[in-house]
Amino acid sequence: MRSSYSFRLVQIIVLCAAVSATAFAQYGGSTGTGTGTGTASSSGGYGSSSGKAIGIGVGVAAAVTGIALYVHHRHNAAPTQASLVGCTQSAQNGMSVTNEKDNKTYSLAAEGTGLKAGERVALRGRMARDGSGDQIFRVQNVVKDYGTCSLSSALVAPSASR
């Protein structure tokens, strides 16, 4: 968490430096005589060194913008993990779990996790839908096994299917 704030701070500092570099390149010091006529002499206009500074500033700003967009896209494109806590039950086609938080029942895709019916568990994984539109929870790991379910939750859980 702290590293993301540090990364954002560095991004802001780099962006500010890039913007100020382009502003400095455009409005650098003038070596004119100061006659007040409002015309630019050859020494007070944009020289070749100012052009290089503007080009560097624009390049840095473009690179920072590109990196920021890439990081933002990667962050939003990453699939989110879900977690739920509930009691597992035997179902027609495998096993299901009823989430205690929203009382919804999910079919479990939990190959190799060693889950058994009648256990109260905390699971981490991804939500999905099967071909018929039913909700599936693809288990990545069992966070915690709380032991066997109480009798009241075992009786309520099968009727909560939605």
Image: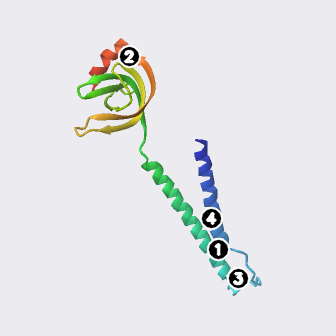
Mark-to-mark CA distance, 1 and 2: 69 Å
Amino acid type at mark 4 = Ala
Mark-to-mark CA distance, 3 and 1: 16 Å
Judging by the rendered image, the residue that carries numbered circle 2 is: 149
Decide: marks 3, 1 in contact (CB < 8 A)?
Answer: no
Amino acid type at mark 3 = Gly
- Residue drawn at x 30%, y 15% is 155
Q: In terms of secondary structure, where does tag 1 sit?
A: helix
Mark-to-mark CA distance, 3 and 2: 82 Å
Horizontal and vertical percent position of residue 97? 34, 26
Judging by the rendered image, the residue that carries numbered circle 4 is: 18
Outermost residue toward the right in this view: 33
**First reached walking from the N terminus: tag 1 or tag 2:** 1
**First reached walking from the N terminus: tag 2 or tag 4:** 4
Amino acid type at mark 2 = Cys
Decide: marks 3, 2 in contact (CB < 8 A)?
Answer: no
**First reached walking from the N terminus: tag 4 or tag 3:** 4
Judging by the rendered image, the residue that carries numbered circle 3 is: 44
Horizontal and vertical percent position of residue 91? 26, 25
Decide: marks 2, 4 in contact (CB < 8 A)?
Answer: no
Mark-to-mark CA distance, 4 and 3: 23 Å
Whether 22 is drawn above or below 160: the answer is: below
Outermost residue toward the top in this view: 151
User: Horizontally, is 111 left or right of 25 in the view?
Assistant: left
Q: Residues within 10 Å of mark 2 (few under 14, many from 20)?
A: some
User: Horizontally, is 131 left or right of 55 in the view?
Assistant: left
- Label ID, residue 135: none
Q: In terms of secondary structure, where does tag 2 sit?
A: loop
Decide: marks 4, 3 in contact (CB < 8 A)?
Answer: no
